[in-house]
Image (cartoon, rainbow, N blue to C red):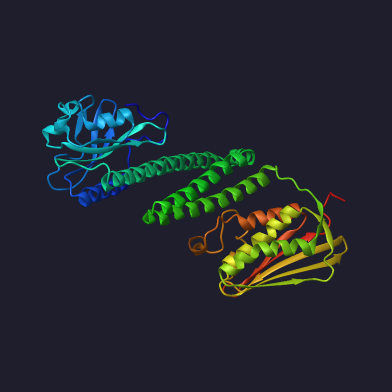
Amino acid sequence: MNEPKSNRYRKHDIPDDYIRKWQETIDVLAAVFKIPAGLIMRVHAEEIEVLVSSQSDDNPYESGEKANLKSGLYCETVMATRAPLHVPNALEDPDWHNNPDIELNMTSYIGMPLIWPDDSVFGTICILDKKQLDSGGSQLQLVKQFKEIIERDFQMLVRDAELQSKSQELEKALAAAESANDAKSSFLANMSHELRTPMNAILGYSELLIEEAEDVRQLDIIPDLKKINQAGNHLLALIDDVLDLSKIESGRMEVCADDIDVSSMINQVADTAQALMHKNNNQFIIELGKHLGYIHQDVAKLRQSLLNLLSNAAKFTHEGTITLQADRESQADGDWLTLSVSDSGIGISEDKLEDIFEEFIQAEGFTTRDYGGTGLGLSISRRLCRMLGGDITVKSSKGDGSTFTIHIPALLPGSG
């Protein structure tokens, strides 16, 4: 039999949890029909192996046993023809007189091929008995159903292997980027698409695996698959933050000014933030000044900075109040826009206020553990606001909430 063509996952490396599951499957098959032998066979280059053998009385086969191919076994015919086989009574059929199974008094056989996702033959699933098996009844149908279940498991194994491979590739890329800060900045700024693509593939595969597990009722693995998906989303957010930071550090992030309807922009950002507010049962209040009008600024960077402040407020506030205020005021050097986000959350210690805008720094050691995050959001937001000619400031005390304020000119410097 041929080995798989080019699978990332070698079909002979079957994880123990799948072997245990298949053992339960084959035990059920043997018990239902009260037969001595239910088997899952696996083919090697020149041998065939009993991968799983039912733990039933009078079963002459043991897991791990191997036989040479071309021995005249029933399973050889199944694998060669890639078709189901029913032998009612081998003693009455001269084609099977040299079959070694007869010596074990296994004279009746029903078996089906197990096909790997690359269309190569993995082996067989079969039942054997000294009494005649009935191919026209429930025995054949149940063997067929278990064959389909195992072949779905094959697909999940291959998908899982591809997922692991992409994760390893991503980890290598991140490790290489972290080896030197200058190399990191240049590399990540140029490779944003290449890094996001495999991460999106990981998320897509995890969602497919969850759907597949639900379809085949493998409910016990769904929580772990959801953890993979959640971790993938967290890692994707981290990648986005690192990419933004690296672009800023390498000087490759450009500003692009457009005329912005301030009230409309704020309402759009607020709509996006509503789900974040509801997650922790927070009340969200918006207070807009009367003369916000239009500004000439980079809307993407302003929106990103404001959404990050709202996201932080929602994350660190539970069953509290978050207020977004917007005002415009005239100064000697022109009009300025002020956007303030106040919350009634956990607040920040006074001695930590100088540190929260540093990369990979969060206000308290427990915030990363309890609330997650990369420690990059505020640093990126401040840098973006400074690129717009403004800044972000903070007022806070531990236990009394925080107020973060974006203060930017209505006209992007250099664009007038």
Residue 243 is left or right of residue 34, and the answer is right
Q: Residue at x 12, y 44 (%)?
A: 58
Q: Which x, y percent locates residue 141? A: 31, 46
For residue 349, say whether it is visible. Answer: no
Above or below, 36 against 386 in this view is above
Q: At which x and y percent is residue 24?
A: 26, 50
Q: Residue at x 84, y 49 (%)?
A: 414
Q: Which residue is depicted at the point 75% across and 61% down?
A: 265
Q: Nearer the viewer, residue 396 or 126?
A: 126
**Viewport quadrant of the N terminus:** top left
Residue 385 quadrant: bottom right
- 53 vs 148, nearest the viewer: 148
Compare residues 77 and 255 and report the one nearer the observer.
77
> Up-down: is 279 above or below 176?
below
Residue 195 lies, with reference to residue 103, above or below; the image says below
Q: Position of residue 335 (x, y in %)?
A: 85, 62
Task: Left or right? Give the position of 220 relative to 375.
Answer: left
Residue 179: image location, x then y, percent = 53, 40
Task: Examine the rendering and report whether any part of residue 347 can be seen.
Answer: yes
How many numbered callouts? 0
